[in-house]
């Protein structure tokens, strides 16, 4: 059976032609399929696609699920009309096949419109100021359009074809309430699809928040080989040769010759062998085994790709250095003998700590600087650990909001008192569908924190960013208590007299455990401190109960590895305990799934049982986020006392 080179396959192989083979074979595990946040973004793209159709009313929708030959014949039949709009128009040239999001024909002109959920501001440039290369952030989108143009020009040589991107205009506000809720994500035969609310049309969706942007000059750059410095020899051969060669390899189901380099650092097929299930394969492992003749043992050695925040990996590879251990003879950026003589690490020192411990050249004990304990002495009790959940929707939920502005819908707060007593002091979530949550959110947060001057902790800068977005909304909408809320927010955000303490910054500056493997994410720091800490073992081997998590033993070991499991893996799935509940297999353990779960709650067709089950799962997840911060603090307090 013929295999077509589609736009999704072309884009997947954009920086590495070898990935085309892995894309074709499901046994090669990809991080793109597993990443909850990426999935949420992808589903947001589906909603934007349906919104775009409303801006081009009267179009003909060609089903994506039908046979390619039928889609092609329907498209060609519609193009016999002088004036027509087609959604998902099918175009083929030889073994290349594309589905155009919106194809608008008027006379002899075709407007080829690719819809993306990427944000854009009016007059934003797609190229660097000092050179003609396309910004790396825009390459995927513009090369996608260029591929479609290449196919369309060969399929329809007699037409004038103009390429466009349809993008989220960040300068526009939604002028109707509940715009997001017009586009419900559903699942059918294992695939996500969008159900548009009955009766919705261009006339009742308010001002347009998507902008059609002509990208002809950038497409011509790409087709002429001038869009960027070629990423590989195939791209350097010219666009036509590039497409032709990819098509040929696709037809014979053959892997393009492997080359390794800095492009492999963030490869979606880079999965460690111990994370693979039966029958699954690692594309990264296959490439490096083939190119470098590595064994599984060499693959398992700490790679220079894993050095935290190191931008020198390309230089290392050029010198034939691939493993961290190869840096030890003289390429370290900091003196390994003086790493513990200061109160705070520089980035180079922090990288060196990781390298030394990963290669066995320092003890495998956790590393902690005295500056951590000095900073702890400056805090005021009680200590409040807070975490927010928020949506950043492409299509706003509420009138007056701009796309991709953060809308907080939930928080949790744990409090530690000076005598060591721990309390899950507050939690809040907006359960009512369609209700604007931002102001009640900050009112409840203020109520939780305003009764003392205790230090407030966040993990990274997300909470600070969210609160600043809320200030913008308060200034614009002016509820009765706007001035009071703004004044209070400014006390705990950056520059305020009670500015929140960033626990993630403290991890970077003062603390490292080999269990973290270079990551500073709370999802990796939490299991690391659990593996390190006798105090946490003592506390959390006993059942923990907060406001939503009840009688849960959070210190549990993996039977195979002997390491302590991440408590996020112990969270119950949505609807746990409800017989035959349809989403009982879905667990909220990432910010992306939390965002999608709350978004589903905004639709009014959920049963009370479904809404309550989702709400409870969200509360447990957010509670664990602040408890994770508490556990990190408790371990540091133990180290300080010992």
Image: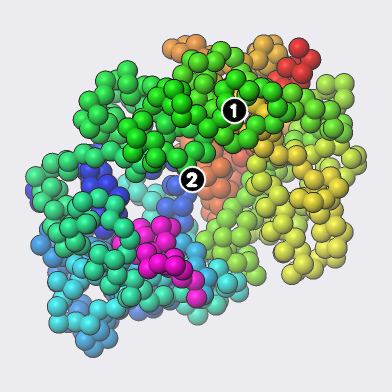
Describe residue 539's horizontal placement relative to residue 521 as left or right.
right
- Nearest the camera: 251 or 397? 251
Query: Is residue 519 shown to the viewer in this render?
Result: no
Query: Is residue 137 shown to the viewer in this render?
Result: yes
Farthest front residue in view: 330
Q: State the SS at label 1.
A: helix
Residue 575 inside the magenta-drawn segment: no
x then y, percent, for residue 307: 48, 32
- Nearest the camera: 264 or 194? 264
Mark 2 to mark 1: distance in Å?
A: 20 Å
Report the quarter where the C terminus lies.
Answer: top right
x then y, percent, for residue 47: 45, 61
Describe residue 451's horizontal placement relative to residue 578 as left or right.
right
With respect to residue 36, does 405 lie above or below?
A: below
- Nearest the camera: 475 or 391? 475
Q: At 66% from the left edge and 22% from the top edge, which residue is drawn?
A: 340
Foreground mark, 2 or 1? 1
Which dot marks residue 37? 2
Q: At 22% from the left edge and 57% from the top edge, which residue is drawn?
A: 236
Describe residue 627's horizontal placement relative to residue 521 as left or right.
right
Asked if the residue at tag 1 contacts the one at tag 2, i.e. Cβ–Cβ closer than 8 Å, the answer is no
Q: Give, as a single range, the part of the protein colored magenta.
A: 123-144
Counting other residues with Cα less than 10 Å from the Cα at mark 1, is it few (<14), some (14-19), or many (20 or more)? many
Q: State the SS at label 2.
A: helix
With respect to residue 579, does 420 lie above or below?
A: above
x then y, percent, for residue 385: 75, 35
Which dot marks residue 525? 1
- Nearest the camera: 41 or 604? 41
x then y, percent, for residue 440: 76, 54
């Amino acid at each position: 059976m013929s295999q077509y080179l589609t736009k999704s396959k072309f884009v997947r192989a954009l920086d590495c032609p070898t990935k085309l083979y892995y894309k074709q074979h499901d046994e090669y595990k990809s991080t793109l399929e597993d990443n909850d946040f990426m999935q949420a973004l992808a589903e947001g793209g589906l909603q934007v696609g349906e919104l775009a159709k409303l801006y081009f009313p009267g179009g003909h929708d060609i089903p994506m699920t039908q046979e390619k030959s039928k889609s092609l014949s329907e498209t060609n039949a519609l193009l016999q009309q002088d004036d027509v709009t087609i959604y998902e128009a099918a175009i083929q040239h030889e073994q290349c096949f594309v589905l155009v999001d919106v194809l608008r024909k008027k006379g002899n002109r075709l407007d080829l419109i690719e819809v993306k959920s990427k944000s854009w501001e009016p007059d934003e440039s797609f190229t660097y100021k000092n050179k003609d290369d396309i910004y790396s952030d825009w390459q995927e989108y513009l090369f996608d359009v260029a591929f479609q143009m290449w196919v369309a020009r060969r399929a329809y040589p007699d037409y004038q074809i103009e390429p466009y991107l349809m993008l989220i205009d960040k300068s526009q506000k939604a002028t109707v309430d509940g715009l997001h809720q017009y586009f419900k994500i559903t699942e059918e035969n294992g695939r996500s699809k969008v159900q548009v609310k009955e009766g919705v049309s261009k006339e009742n969706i308010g001002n347009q928040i998507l902008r059609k942007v002509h990208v002809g000059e950038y497409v011509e750059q790409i087709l002429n080989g001038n869009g960027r410095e070629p990423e590989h020899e195939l791209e350097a051969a010219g666009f036509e040769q590039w497409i032709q060669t990819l098509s040929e390899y696709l037809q014979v189901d053959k892997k393009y010759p492997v080359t390794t380099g800095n492009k492999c650092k963030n490869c979606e097929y880079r999965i460690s062998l111990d994370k693979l299930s039966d029958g699954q394969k690692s594309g990264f492992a296959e490439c490096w085994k083939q190119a470098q003749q590595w064994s599984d043992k060499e693959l398992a050695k700490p790679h220079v790709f894993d050095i935290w925040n190191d931008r020198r990996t390309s230089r290392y590879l050029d010198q034939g250095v691939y493993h961290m251990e190869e840096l030890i003879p003289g390429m370290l950026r900091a003196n390994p003998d003086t790493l513990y003589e200061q109160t705070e690490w520089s980035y180079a020192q922090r990288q060196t700590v990781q390298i030394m411990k990963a290669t066995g050249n320092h003890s495998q004990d956790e590393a902690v600087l005295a500056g951590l304990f000095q900073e702890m002495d400056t805090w005021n009790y009680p200590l409040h650990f807070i975490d927010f959940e928020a949506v950043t929707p492409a299509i706003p939920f509420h009138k007056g909001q701009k796309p991709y502005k953060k809308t907080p819908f939930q928080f949790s707060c744990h409090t530690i008192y000076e005598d060591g007593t721990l309390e899950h002091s507050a939690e809040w979530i907006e359960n009512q569908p369609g209700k604007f949550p931002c102001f009640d959110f900050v009112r409840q947060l203020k109520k939780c924190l305003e009764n003392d001057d205790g230090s407030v902790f966040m993990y990274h800068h997300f909470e600070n960013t969210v609160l600043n977005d809320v200030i913008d909304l308060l200034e614009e909408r002016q509820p009765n208590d706007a001035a009071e809320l703004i004044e209070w927010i400014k006390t705990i955000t950056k520059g305020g007299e009670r500015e929140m303490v960033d626990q993630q910054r403290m991890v970077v500056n003062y603390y490292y455990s080999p269990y973290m493997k270079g990551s500073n994410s709370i999802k990796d720091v939490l299991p690391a401190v659990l593996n390190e800490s006798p105090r946490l073992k003592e506390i959390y081997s006993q059942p923990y109960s907060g406001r939503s998590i009840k009688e849960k033993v959070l210190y549990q070991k993996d039977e195979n590895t002997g390491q302590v499991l991440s408590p996020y893996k112990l969270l119950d799935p949505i609807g746990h305990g409800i017989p035959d509940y349809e989403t009982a297999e879905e667990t909220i353990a990432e910010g992306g799934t939390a965002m999608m779960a709350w978004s589903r709650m905004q639709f009014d067709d959920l049963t009370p049982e479904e809404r309550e089950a989702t709400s409870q799962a969200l509360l447990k997840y957010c509670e664990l986020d602040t408890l994770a911060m508490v556990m990190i603090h408790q371990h540091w307090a133990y180290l300080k006392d010992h």
